Image (cartoon, coloured by chain):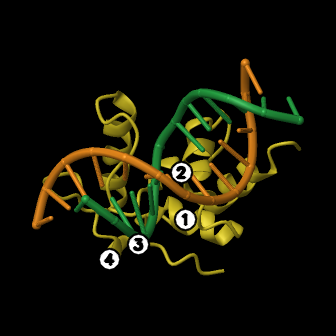
Chain colours: A yellow, B green, C orange
Amino acid sequence: MAANFFEDVYRIVSMIPPGRVATYGQIAAYLGNPRAARTVGWALSSLPAGRDVPWHRVINSQGLISGPCNTRRANEQKALLEEEGVAFDEVGCVDLGRYGWAITL
DNA sequence: CGTATGACGAGCC
DNA sequence: AGGCTCGCCATAC
């Protein structure tokens, strides 16, 4: 596979348990590139359909939903997380210290 | 092969 | 404290 990095990202995201959220930096760091957070986000942006990847559980280090917040995608992400039990702040901020996933293998 | 982009992160003003 | 800029890595063109 050419985009091994992508698959790796999907793999990590797939490991995120319900009611938990992970940050791009964490995933990137787990892949061995703590600086490739951008690439991680890009992988999700290019996330092909057909993957059972809970991309909605991936947010930025601030606990905020990234991407175009004006689109339906961000709205759905928030809705999905809320359904899983993730509480959102009034500004759409998630408590990483409470829902943050530690990537435990 | 070189340039430009991208759902980020951290640092600096 | 808040906002802005630069830097990083990987993929696409």
Mark 1–mark 4 Cα distance, whole angstroms, equals: 14 Å
Corner quadrant of residue A63: bottom left
The residue that mark 2 highlights is: A54
What amino acid is labelled 3 in the image?
Answer: Gly
Q: Would you call the spot at circle 4 few (<14 residues within 10 Å), some (14-19), or many (20 or more)? A: few
The residue that mark 3 highlights is: A100
Circle 1/circle 3 CB separation < 8 Å: no
1 and 4 marks on the same chain: yes
- Earlier in the chain: of badge 1 and badge 4, it is 1
Mark nearer the viewer, 2 or 3: 3
Mark 1–mark 3 Cα distance, whole angstroms, equals: 10 Å
What amino acid is labelled 1 in the image?
Answer: Ile
- Earlier in the chain: of badge 2 and badge 1, it is 1
- Earlier in the chain: of badge 1 and badge 3, it is 1
Q: Residue A16 carries which label?
A: 1
The residue that mark 4 highlights is: A98
